[in-house]
Amino acid sequence: MSTGSHGDVQLENEHFRVTRWTIEPGGAIPMHRHEHEYVVVPLVTDTMHVTNADGSEAVAELTAGRSYTRPAGSEHRVENRASTAPIVFVEVERLS
């Protein structure tokens, strides 16, 4: 089953995991929980839709190059509902 998204791990060592994520139009990263604090670096300016574990929803307005961080324990599904282009970002997880 295709989710319309894929992540390519670019670097992983004892301190960091760096993954480049692509979410195709209509695609999603399925519900997942972040075990580590992380930083997101958007590579595009676009809109993502986020559904949290409790069912609440949020719209994330991305700006290329404008990073943001989230705490460990974040649990959500991320979707590309509205864009006709892929949403692409780099996620940097702090492992230690």
Image (tube, rainbow, N blue to C red):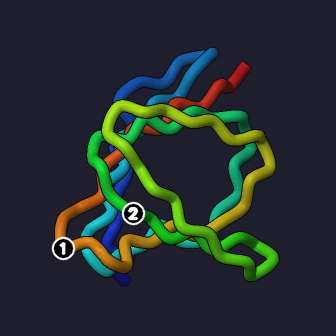
From what the image shows, is residue 64 above or below residue 86? Answer: above
Left or right of residue 62: residue 94: right
Residue pushed farthest left? 85
Q: CA distance from mark 1 to mark 2?
A: 11 Å
From what the image shows, is residue 49 above or below residue 64? Answer: below
SS state under label 1: loop
Instruction: Name the quadrant of the C terminus.
Output: top right
At 41% from the left and 50% from the top, the residue drawn is 62
**Residue type for callout 2:** Thr
At 53% from the left and 18% from the top, the residue drawn is 13
**Residue type for callout 1:** Thr
Residue 9 point in image, percent of width and height: 39, 37
Residue toward you, 57 or 1: 57
Residue toward you, 25 or 2: 25
At 26% from the left and 68% from the top, the residue drawn is 24
Image quadrant of residue 86?
bottom left
At 29% from the left and 40% from the top, the residue drawn is 43
Q: Which residue is mark 2?
A: 47
SS state under label 2: strand
Q: Which mark is residue 7?
A: none
Residue 39 point in image, percent of width and height: 57, 33
From what the image shows, is residue 13 above or below residue 84? Answer: above
Task: Tell me the crowding category of disc 2: few under 14, some 14 to 19, or many 20 or more residues within 10 angstroms, Cα based.
Answer: some
Image quadrant of residue 10?
top left
Q: Which residue is mark 1?
A: 84
From what the image shows, is residue 57 above or below residue 32? Answer: below
